Image (spheres, rainbow, N blue to C red):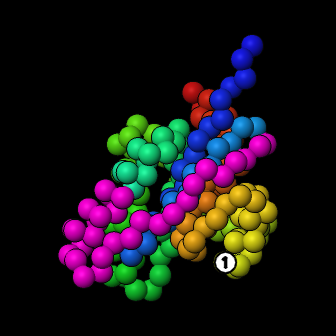
Amino acid sequence: MAASPPIRIIGIDPGLRNTGWGVIESLGPSLRFVACGTVHSDQSLTLSDRLRQLFDGLSEIVHAHAPDEAAVEETFVNKDAKATLKLGHARGIALLVPSRAGLPVAEYAPNLVKKSIVGTGHAEKDQIRMMVKVLLPKADPKSADANDALAVALTHAQHRGMKSLTKSLMR
């Protein structure tokens, strides 16, 4: 019986200015870093042009790395409604790109990502960065956004089995 291939997961941390992405492979308890980075949009452009930049950039990443599944961080709602709405637009792109590529897309709350990676839902960025490095020693995120995207991918690797089990039990 042939061994099953690793599952390639892209994690996405949406942002209008900077959208982080991270690709890992998961095979049982084994995790392997593949790549990570940040897609930037030009603040001097219109909202629609910035969203197009994010769409084009993420589309290139998905095409280049051929993930099997995607995970996107849910929006953290803050007191600035306008900023939250703009983040929602970027999040829409982060959901749309992998969906158009035919990938199943999971969503994770920021506190669940922190709890999954560090063990507490109120972890600091430095704690997350340190644990991503422990879990993926070869990872080289150049930005907090890319690091957060890797954390989202790691969270999905941890929770994807439970999501599949829950789905099959509900049938």
Q: Residue 103, located in which quarter of the rendered image?
A: top left
Taking the image as drawn, is residue 87 in sight?
A: no
Q: Position of residue 121 (x, y in %)?
A: 71, 71
Residue 20 covered by magenta stretch: no
Which quadrant would the C terminus be assigned to in this image?
Answer: top right
Which residue is drawn at the image coordinates 79% and 63% (left, top)? Answer: 134
Q: Residue 36, located in which quarter of the rendered image?
A: bottom right
Q: Quickly name the residue at label 1.
A: 125
Q: Which residues are magenta?
A: 29-57
Which residue is drawn at the image coordinates 40% and 37% (left, top)? Answer: 102
Up the image or down, 35 lies above or below 78; here it is: above
Taking the image as drawn, is residue 154 in sight?
A: yes
Q: Residue 146, located in which quarter of the rendered image?
A: bottom right
Which quadrant would the N terminus be assigned to in this image?
Answer: top right
Q: Position of residue 112 (x, y in %)?
A: 66, 63
Up the image or down, 33 lies above or below 86; here it is: above
Estimate how packed mark 1 is, as few (under 14), some (14 to 19) or many (20 or more) residues with alpha carbons within 10 Å: few
Which residue is drawn at the image coordinates 64% and 44% (left, top)? Answer: 25
- Looking at numbered disc 1 in the image, what kind of residue is underneath it? Lys
Instruction: Count up the numbered dots.
Output: 1
Secondary element type, mark 1: helix
- In depth, the one of 67 and 37 nearer the eye is 37
- In depth, the one of 152 and 78 nearer the eye is 152
Q: Is residue 138 left or right of residue 78?
A: right
Up the image or down, 2 lies above or below 62; here it is: above
Residue 32 covered by magenta stretch: yes
Q: Is residue 71 left or right of residue 124?
A: left
